[in-house]
Image (cartoon, rainbow, N blue to C red):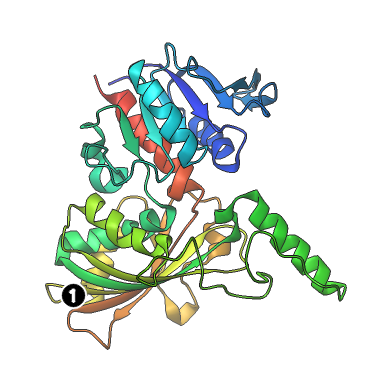
Amino acid sequence: MRKRKVNIAVVGVTGAVGQEMLRVLETRRFPVNQLVPLASKRSAGKRIRFKGKFITVSELTRDSFKDIDIALFSAGGEISKKFAPMAVKTKTVVVDNSSAFRMEKDVPLVVPEINGKDALKHKGIIANPNCTTAITLMALNPLHQAFGVKRIFAATYQAVSGSGAQGIIELEQQVKALAKGRKVKKAVYPHQIAFNALPHVDTFLSNGYTKEEMKLENEGRKIMHHARFKASSTCVRIPVYRAHSIAVNAEFNKPVSVSAARRVLKKAPGLDLLDDVKNNVYPLALDMAEKDNCAVGRIRKDCAMKNGLSFWVVGDQILKGAALNAVQIAELIAARP
């Protein structure tokens, strides 16, 4: 069935994720009738390139969504809270990349390979999950469907681009300063990020975890439809430009062997199985940067848990963790009769 052509707006189009959204729309041949690039007043007037043509960026206002079918939002939670309801009033379907609506009862939280049908139950807004959650679940959910996951312990290794362009710039500047024997300057992170590992992503909560660490449990429950799912995570920022890596120790209700796990994961959509330790084959952030698929490897029986399995999953947090996932959701909406 031929997809209908749609009018689509990209809010926050001049940001890193907004730029990736444009690229993904183009490379996946999304059925665009009209593209409306939107950004702040400061960025209005800039020109972006889409399908070989230059289009002028317009300022985001309450009147921006007339005749827009789908709006992809990636401009931060406050912008989403203000403008997404305005868009919905014009019958625009909003796919929001911020955390503003993720845990709202009537807002589907969607990873298309896992719970794509939930997107079709929307009431105007569909939420994109946290990037680390999305990447982790690409490997965990297929195993959950086969063996029933009870809980996981996870350590994440998150790239500086997860903090935006300023994270990349700070890492580059610190590396250059250290190479010249100069004192580093800190603005984005509370400590030096160059040649370091910071166990601090997002703000700390009263329970000692950070907001980022709690997202894996809270969002995982909603996406997998698994109210009893438990996740204890430590999120670490590392001096890598792009792609997040997660070490997962999972406990299942049913016995799980390495061979059975590999068979399940090999069939999982959007996931590459890279697991040949004899030949030093396993997922690497350098290799997975700018790749659509996530990858899983280092699969082994967990020696500390009954029915336990340990694995390593890597994915590009700007693509599957943000722009690609949002466009995939938009594809589901565009394909709807």
Reply above or below: 77 against 250: above
Identify the residue at image location x=15%, y=67%: 147
Locate residue 259 relative to residue 128 in the image: left or right. left
Q: Which image quarter holds the N terminus?
A: top left
Question: Where does residue 36 sit, x and y in percent of width and height?
Answer: 53, 19
Reply above or below: 118 against 269: above
- The answer to whether residue 82 is seen in the rendering is yes
User: Crowding near pointer 1: few (<14 within 10 Å), some, many (20+)?
Assistant: some
Q: Which image quarter holds the C terminus?
A: top left
Question: Where does residue 4 sit, x and y in percent of width and height?
Answer: 35, 17
Identify the residue at image location x=65%, y=71%: 191
Label tally: 1
Reply above or below: 234 against 169: below
Of residues 128 and 186, which is closer to you in this image? Answer: 186
Locate residue 326 relative to residue 262 in the image: left or right. right
Residue type, label 1 = Val
Question: Where does residue 152 sit, x and y in percent of width and height?
Answer: 28, 71
Question: Disc 1 designates what residue?
Answer: 256
- The answer to whether residue 28 is seen in the rendering is no
